[in-house]
Image (tube, rainbow, N blue to C red):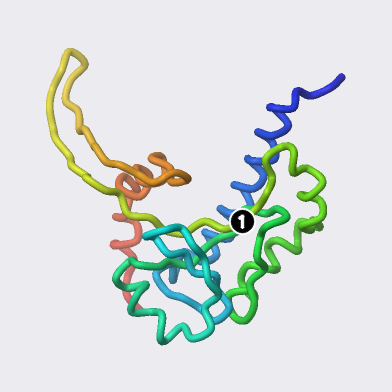
Amino acid sequence: YTVDKHLKGLFVSAYQSYLFNRVLVARMPDIDKLLLGDMAYLHVNGACFRVEQPEVEQPRCDRFEISATGPLLGGRTTKLTGPAGEIENPILDGESLNEQDFRQMKHLGARGGRRPLRFQPRNASMSCGQDNFGPYLEFRFELDAGCYATTLLAEITKDRSATAAEPEE
């Protein structure tokens, strides 16, 4: 039994997303902070550069000009160093994979690279209404390629009451 090339590519892409999401969860508490050794993403043009002085670059991050990135594992994935690498590398190393494994699957679309850990929707709006099915909320927004509406909606609709109800220590 053989698996279609497009289905294999889908499996590889899903695995890359799985690894990216694991890194994202690990970085989530401080998602808006750059760390030494990060690869920063320039939102204006998609270029990446290594963060060597996080205290110098942080104001640009605060203005959402740049963001820390997560891996799309493949031959073109830049490995992080320093404190950023101490978070990301154990996650990737724990999978017993390396870039060479993905180089061999380049024909399936596993080129690799990095994408920002956060994004900003553009032209966002919300409206309420009612139709034949009842009341509804409508969210409208634009996202860059590689950003997912499901991620944005999950953040908008998540239950924060459990966190808010926790007693302070």
**Relative height, residue 26 to residue 136 (above, below):** below
| Identity, as a three-letter code, of the amino acid under mark 1 | Gly
Specify the quadrant that holds the N terminus: top right
**Relative height, residue 31 to residue 107 (above, below):** below
Total count of labels = 1
Specify the quadrant that holds the C terminus: bottom left
* Residue with the mark numbered 1: 113
Q: Residue at 22% x, 45% y: name it.
A: 124
- How would you rate the neighbour count of disc 1 (Cα within 10 Å): few for under 14, some for 14-19, many for 20 or more? some
Left or right side of 146 for 112: right
Q: Position of residue 6 (x, y in %)?
A: 69, 27
Q: Residue furthest top?
A: 132
Q: Residue furthest right?
A: 1
Q: Position of residue 16 (x, y in %)?
A: 64, 48
Q: Secondary structure at mark 1?
A: strand
Left or right side of 71 for 108: right
Left or right side of 140 for 148: right
Q: Position of residue 91 (x, y in %)?
A: 68, 63
Location of residue 109 (image quadrant): top right
Left or right side of 30 for 65: left
Q: Residue at 44% x, 71% y: name it.
A: 30
Q: Residue at 40% x, 86% y: name it.
A: 56
**Relative height, residue 7 to residue 49 (above, below):** above
Q: Residue at 74% x, 38% y: name it.
A: 107
**Relative height, residue 163 to residue 127 (above, below):** below
Q: Position of residue 161 (x, y in %)?
A: 29, 55
